[in-house]
């Protein structure tokens, strides 16, 4: 009997732990919050910081769009977060900055738009749009530049030397 209980515990406990890990806590802080009742909308302004255990999302303004998931409990679920002005996402692997961004919470995808700078260690890349999938931890940087249709990628251990090289080349 003891062995049966032990087997049942070994089967069900990992599933319970896994279920708990799939719901990642998300915190949003800012200096100012505007809530619009019955519109499923909250706006965070000034030094907005969204943190999860695996990634952070910063901006000067974030608009959070929610939907009711339970009429009985009146609980809300975040659908989409739109960010503007000095947008940045980062984790232990990279930092990406741009003019605006969208975080699709259900899909777990971040998009940053406009003057995107992606820094991954000593690699720096420039583009117009950066998409990052949290689940598979993969990102894609693209450019809307019609002339070369490519993002600019710079890989250099010493950025001071790179600046000197670029200045010398521009003077020639």
Image (cartoon, rainbow, N blue to C red):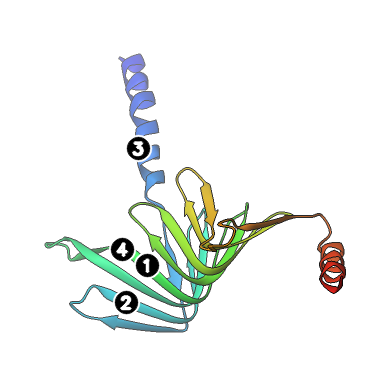
Mark 1 and mark 3 lie on one chain; the one further toward the N terminus is: 3
Q: Are marks 1 and 3 in contact (CB under 8 Å)?
A: no
Tell me if 170 is positioned left or right of 110 in this view: right
| Pair 1/2: label in front | 1
Q: Are marks 1 and 4 in contact (CB under 8 Å)?
A: yes
Residue that label 4 marks: 78
Distance Cα–Cα, label 1 vs label 4: 8 Å
Q: In the structure shown, which secondary structural element does the residue marked by tag 2 occupy?
A: strand
Of the numbered discs in the image, which one, if any, rests on residue 16?
3
Report x, y in % for residue 125: 65, 58
Name the one closer to the observer, 38 or 117.
117
* Quadrant where the image shows the N terminus: top left
Q: In the structure shown, which secondary structural element does the residue marked by tag 4 occupy?
A: strand
| Pair 1/3: label in front | 1
| Pair 1/4: label in front | 1
Q: Residue at x 33, y 29 (%)?
A: 12
Name the one closer to the observer, 82 or 148.
148
* Mark 4 crowdedness (10 Å alpha carbons): few <14, some 14-19, many ≥20: some
Report x, y in % for residue 76: 24, 64
Residue that label 2 marks: 42
Asked where in the image residue 42 lies, by quadrant, the reply is bottom left
Q: In the structure shown, which secondary structural element does the residue marked by tag 3 occupy?
A: helix
* Mark 2 crowdedness (10 Å alpha carbons): few <14, some 14-19, many ≥20: some
Residue that label 1 marks: 81
* Vertical comparison of 22 with 27: above or below: above
Report x, y in % for residue 163: 82, 68
Mark 3 and mark 2 lie on one chain; the one further toward the N terminus is: 3
């Amino acid at each position: 009997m003891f062995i049966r209980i032990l087997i049942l515990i070994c089967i069900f406990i990992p599933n319970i732990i896994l279920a708990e890990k799939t719901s990642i806590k998300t915190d949003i802080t800012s200096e100012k919050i505007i809530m619009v009742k019955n519109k499923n909308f909250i706006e965070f302004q000034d030094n907005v910081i969204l943190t999860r255990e695996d990634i952070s999302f910063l901006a000067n303004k974030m608009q959070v769009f929610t939907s009711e998931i339970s009429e009985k409990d009146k609980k809300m679920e975040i659908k989409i977060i739109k960010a503007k002005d000095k947008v940045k996402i980062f984790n232990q692997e990279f930092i990406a900055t741009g003019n605006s961004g969208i975080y699709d919470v259900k899909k777990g995808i971040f998009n940053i738009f406009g003057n995107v700078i992606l820094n991954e260690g000593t690699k720096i890349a420039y583009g117009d749009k950066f998409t990052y999938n949290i689940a598979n931890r993969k990102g894609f940087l693209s450019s809307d530049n019609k002339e070369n249709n490519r993002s600019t990628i710079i890989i250099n251990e010493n950025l001071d030397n790179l600046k000197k090289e670029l200045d010398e080349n521009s003077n020639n």
